[in-house]
Amino acid sequence: MLGIVFPATSMDIGSAETERFFEQQLVKHRFPGDWAQDIAFAYRDCVVLTPAQWRYCAWAAVRRGASLAQQQGPHADGTREAIYQEVRRRASVVPVVLRAAVPFRYLPRSQKVR
């Protein structure tokens, strides 16, 4: 019996792309790649972000984990939890930072407008 296959939503594709990027970053810094599945919990608990914003959160979290690993040793307890908490922290901060950004003006205001 053939089942109905629904097309993947952009959110599914974006989350899969982000998880793959997170895994690549983890492996690049010699962490286990299976830690990348932790980002799914952050998706569920945090606000909706674009894939680019999630990639930033993942990159920053792995950078934080690499810093901890250099300070405390590569197999230090709590590194995985620190990476996860950093993903969550960044995901909660990104929308606030974007709202505070001032739009860029391409042209100066003319004397007539003033």
Image (cartoon, rainbow, N blue to C red):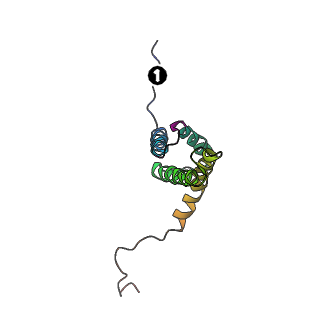
Question: Closest to the observer: 72 or 54?
Answer: 72
Q: How many marks?
A: 1
Image quadrant in which the C terminus is located: bottom left
| Residue type, mark 1 in image | Ile
Residue furthest top in the image = 1
Question: Closest to the observer: 66 or 41?
Answer: 66
69 displayed left or right of 50: right
* Position of residue 35 measured from the top left corner of the image (x, y, whole percent): 56, 39
* Position of residue 89 measured from the top left corner of the image (x, y, whole percent): 61, 55
* Position of residue 56 measured from the top left corner of the image (x, y, whole percent): 48, 53
Segment tinted magenta in the rendering: 29-34
Mark 1: few/some/many CA within 10 Å (<14, 14-19, 20+): few
Question: Closest to the observer: 70 or 57?
Answer: 70
Q: Residue at x 46, y 46 (%)?
A: 25
Q: Quadrant of residue 107?
A: bottom left
Q: Is 110 one of the magenta-colored residues?
A: no
Q: Residue at x 48, y 46 (%)?
A: 29
* Position of residue 45 measured from the top left corner of the image (x, y, whole percent): 63, 46
Residue receiving disc 1: 4
Tell me if residue 76 comes above or below residue 90 in the rendering: above
Report the magenta stretch's main SS: loop
Residue furthest front in the image = 73
Element type where label 1 sits in the image: loop
78 displayed left or right of 49: right
